[in-house]
């Protein structure tokens, strides 16, 4: 996405996000601009936050022009992962339980696993051992397995 934009195009988009003109984007500026431009993200704020955190390479709490392309690419990538997450999260409660995971095994290309192997895979993803896979946990797993590329 962003990798296909010229520096001039990227700067123009960045300036649209930079509401106060200080040359750096706070999370608030990013969230408000994304939600204004793409209202469908109102139920996907986790995606915006995840992309923001990934793009903030300097860890200064802002996205600067050099990080902005990373942000746009991450926003697109995490949106795709959220769509996959939603396909598996059958009751749409923002969490994947083991039953959801079993039913979503085809989406994850895990159809050859036995139930015991599937449970072990679920437990590997459930980093906090809460019995549920949260979006952040799913993202960590999906990135390691390159899930978005396999599904599309």
Image (cartoon, grey):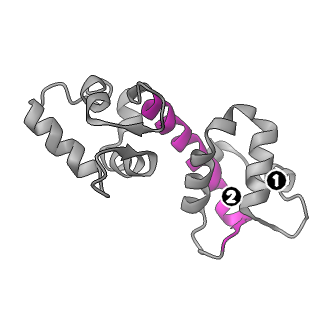
63 vs 20, left or right, is: left
Visible in this render: residue 144? yes
17 vs 143, left or right, is: right
Q: Position of residue 60 (x, y in %)?
A: 65, 76
State whether the magenta stretch is mostly helix, strand or loop. Answer: helix
Q: Label 1, secondary structure: give it.
A: helix
According to the picture, the residue beneath numbered tag 2 turns out to be: 68
Q: Position of residue 37 (x, y in %)?
A: 80, 37
* Residue 50 among those drawn in magenta: no
* Residue 82 among those drawn in magenta: yes
Above or below: residue 27 compared with residue 99: below
Give the quarter of the image for residue 76: top right
Observer-nearest of 119 and 105: 119
According to the picture, the residue beneath numbered tag 1 turns out to be: 17
131 vs 149, left or right, is: left
23 vs 47, left or right, is: right
Query: What is the quadrant of the C terminus in the image?
Result: top left
Circle 2/circle 1 CB separation < 8 Å? yes
What range of the chain is rendered magenta?
A: 61-86
Q: Position of residue 28 (x, y in %)?
A: 76, 58
Above or below: residue 121 compared with residue 7: above
Observer-nearest of 10 and 120: 120
N-terminal of the pair, mark 2 or mark 1, is 1
């Amino acid at each position: 996405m962003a990798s296909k934009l010229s520096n001039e195009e990227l700067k123009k988009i960045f300036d649209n996000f930079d509401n106060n003109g200080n040359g750096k984007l706070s999370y608030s500026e990013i969230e408000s601009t994304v939600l204004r431009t793409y209202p469908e993200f109102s139920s996907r704020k986790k995606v915006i936050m995840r992309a923001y955190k990934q793009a903030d390479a300097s860890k200064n709490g802002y996205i600067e022009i050099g990080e902005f392309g990373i942000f746009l690419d991450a926003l697109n990538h995490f949106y795709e992962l959220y769509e996959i997450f939603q396909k598996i999260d059958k009751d749409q409660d923002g969490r994947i339980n083991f039953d959801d995971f079993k039913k979503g095994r085809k989406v994850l290309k895990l159809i050859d696993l036995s139930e015991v192997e599937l449970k072990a895979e679920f437990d590997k993803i459930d980093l906090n051992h809460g019995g549920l896979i949260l979006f952040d946990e799913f993202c960590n797993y999906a990135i390691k397995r390159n899930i978005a590329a396999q599904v599309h």
